[in-house]
Image: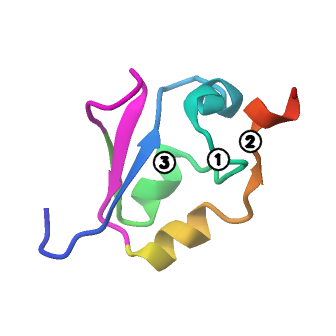
Amino acid sequence: MRPNDERLYTKSLELMKAGELAQTIPHRQIGITTVSEVRKAGGDVVRTAGRSPYHATLTGLTPEQVSKLLTPTVLNPRRERK
């Protein structure tokens, strides 16, 4: 990792839908992107230990780059059913 590298903890699993991954995310709004888009922007997504088996860390991008990838946000599908 580069010095001063920013990290974002996220959920990731190949072929899983965002709604499935969002089940354990408490936030009302979520941003959605793909590992491919993150890597195209110069970052990486790697599986890491966390609160769920789908935990991952997004690294190698600035906060501005991450914001661009995750905007616009959407209502967390977990919240839509309530």
Which SS does the magenta portion mostly show?
loop
Q: What element carries label 3?
A: helix
Q: Give the range drawn in magenta.
A: 47-61
**Residue under circle 1?**
27
Q: Do the residues labelled 1 and 2 touch (CB within 8 Å)?
A: yes
Q: Earlier in the sequence, mark 3 or mark 2?
A: 3
**Residue under circle 3?**
36
- Residue at coordinates 46% horizontally, 56% vertically from top-left? 38
Q: What element carries label 2?
A: loop
Number of other residues with Cα within 10 Å of mark 1, as a class: few under 14, some 14 to 19, many 20 or more: few
- Residue at coordinates 61% horizontally, 40% vertically from top-left? 26
Mark carried by residue 14:
none
Q: Position of residue 35 (x, y in %)?
A: 47, 45
Residue 63: quadrant of the picture: bottom left
Q: Earlier in the sequence, mark 3 or mark 1?
A: 1
Q: How many angstroms separate mark 1 from mark 2 (CA)?
A: 7 Å
Number of other residues with Cα within 10 Å of mark 2, as a class: few under 14, some 14 to 19, many 20 or more: some
Q: In which quarter of the image is the C terminus?
A: top right
Number of other residues with Cα within 10 Å of mark 3, as a class: few under 14, some 14 to 19, many 20 or more: few
Q: In which quarter of the image is the N terminus?
A: bottom left
- Residue at coordinates 26% horizontally, 30% vertically from top-left? 49
Whether 58 is among the magenta residues is: yes
Task: For marks 3 and 1, give the one nearer the viewer.
Answer: 1
Q: Is mark 1 on a helix, strand or loop?
A: loop
Mark carried by residue 76:
2
Kind of residue at disc 3: Ser
For this view, does 12 lie left or right of residue 57? right
